[in-house]
Amino acid sequence: MNNQQKKPAVVIVCGPTGVGKTAAAIRLANTFGGEIVGADSMQIYQQMNIGTAKPTAEEQAAARHHMIDIVPPSAAFDAARYAEMARNIIVDLHRKGKLPIVAGGTGFYVKALTRGLFETLPEDKALRRRLREEAGQHGPGAMLERLRACDPESAQRLHPNDTYRILRALEVFMATGRPLSEHHRRHRFREQPFRTCTIGLTLAREVLYDRINRRVDRMLAEGLVDEVRQLLAAGHASSLKSMGAIGYRHMTDFIQGRLSLEEAVRTMKRDTRRYAKRQLAWFQAESDVHWRTPDQMEEMLTLVKNFLPEAP
RNA sequence: GCCGAGGUAGCUCAGUCGGUAGAGCAGGGGACUGAAAAUCCCCGUGUCGGCAGUUCGAUUCUGUCCCUCGGCA
């Protein structure tokens, strides 16, 4: 057995929101003796259930889920922490002979998990705040000029309007003394701790959008407004990353009187559709995805069966 | 049936004093290395309701027909 085969085998179920990843993952878990590792940047938050379409109690009883409900909505969380925690869980599952099934729509988290991120210092809040203030004072153009001085390659690559990435590049340089472009050149997503089989779930665009629209209506019927009210009442400001999630920010706008309910629902549906489109763009750019529709469950089972070292 | 107002992008509409048209919304494509449900970039050809006439040329003018919405019968 060579090195490649000793790596933990991991099945990944990715795709746009609302396509049916949870159901497919549960089926795979039950068939192959697996447990599910969520890859969703919002389902990690506790108390945010309806709007994140978190697996229900029944679904979580049908198959063990990890990486869900792991921090309160006020906590800071990011792709690096996700990758570290999820990797530990996967190694543990592998040791116990269970098949880890990563299921989720956050492409960046899946990538951080399976290919790693370059090494840098943990988030420095003070530095980040300082950079933001300076951007506010001197304007984004000045920040781009500063970046050009220490990391011309990144300055060239980034669009002048992408202030967020410009500040991040500056932050990396200031924290590590090396330009972001150099970190990228050394890293290049070369880590490969697992053997993976990636299934991308998709649907005809109009069918997917119809499902999304109806799922939003269902979320409202299930009490999304109350869920957001409770989060706000518990002191979770709308400036929190978690509260900026689709649905949560829309309902906050409604609750605080900035939007009518009708308008809040309309824009929530629209923004969910746009999000699904971005997810599709992300996963379609990945080269090793086996695309299936949710009704092709048998094909998915075969795919995973052939991927696993020995037949179950 | 008569009178009026309209029929232009998926939707709501603007516009062309005759040289084949553009906004908002919706939508499409893409990027993405510690906020990623975030952030950022790019994208507007559509029998200008049909047919006929005038004209070098009609979405624009004229006629006629169809459809929609008001009002009157």
Image (cartoon, rainbow, N blue to C red):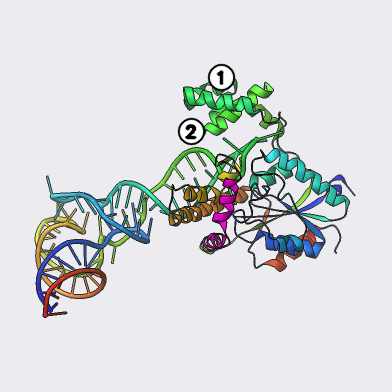
Q: Is residue A228 magenta?
A: yes
| Residue sitting nearer the eye, B22 or A228 | A228
Q: Image quadrant for the C terminus of chain A?
A: bottom right
Q: Secondary structure at mark 2?
A: loop
Identify the magenta region: A212-235
Residues under labels 2 and 1: Cα distance? Answer: 18 Å
Task: Please determine if labels 2 and 1 lie on a single subunit.
Answer: yes
Residue on which disc 1 sits: A149
Q: Residues within 10 Å of mark 2 (few under 14, many from 20)?
A: few
Residue on which disc 2 sits: A161
Q: Residues within 10 Å of mark 1 (few under 14, many from 20)?
A: few
Left or right for A256, reference A80: left
- Kindly report the secondary structure that dominates the magenta region of the rendered protein: helix
Letter of the chain that mark 1 sits on in the rendering: A
Residue A12: image location, x then y, percent: 72, 54
Q: What is the tally of numbered marks visible in this picture?
A: 2
Is mark 2 in CB contact (under 8 Å) with mark 1? no
The answer, for residue A262, to whether it is visible in the render is yes
Left or right for B61, reference A284: left
Left or right for B51, reference A215: left
* A275 vs A130: above or below: below
Residue A72: image location, x then y, percent: 68, 44
